[in-house]
Amino acid sequence: MKPLKKTIKKIRERIGVTPTVFADILGVNFQTVWNWGKGNTNPTDSIRADIFQVLLDAIMEDELPIIETDIELLVSCTRDPQDSTMIRILLDKLNETGKGK
């Protein structure tokens, strides 16, 4: 699996938190997030799901407007091509309702 270091950083920056706060949100230590950021390790599937949920929650709770890169970020947290399709459909529907930009 390719390192998710750029994706992790983009998601963290997208929700506007420091690496330390991101680690706290995910229930991991700072060193773990640092290792992801350096590409030394990747999050487990369980943590990938948590990262997906953190970004999705931020979007759904009106903390963030939907932008095109959200699709890419959410898709990068999934492994199943069907998930990617469902994410695109969900965000398209949200955009239709005026939630997205």
Image: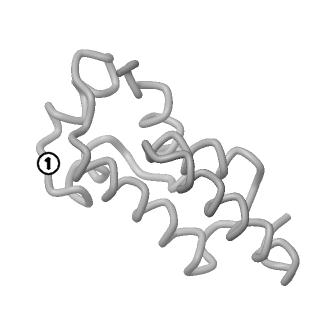
Query: Can you say which quadrant of the picture contains the C terminus?
Result: bottom right
Q: Residue sitting at 31 percent across and 58 percent down?
A: 50
Residue at mark 1: 28
Give the image location of residue 46, x and y in percent.
22, 52
Q: Residue sitting at 58 percent across and 77 percent down?
A: 60
Query: Can you say which quadrant of the picture contains the N terminus?
Result: top left
Which residue type does callout 1 highlight? Val
Q: Residue sitting at 43 percent across and 56 percent down?
A: 52
- How many C-alpha atoms fall within 10 Å of the one at disc 1: few (<14), some, or many (≥20)? few
Q: Is residue 57 above or below residue 74?
A: below
Give the image location of residue 76, x and y in percent.
51, 40
Q: Nearer the viewer, residue 15 or 73?
A: 73
Q: Is residue 17 above or below residue 40?
A: below
Q: Is residue 36 above or below residue 57?
A: above
Is 28 on the left-hand or right-hand side of 89? Answer: left
Q: Nearer the viewer, residue 42 or 62?
A: 42
Q: Is residue 61 above or below residue 5?
A: below
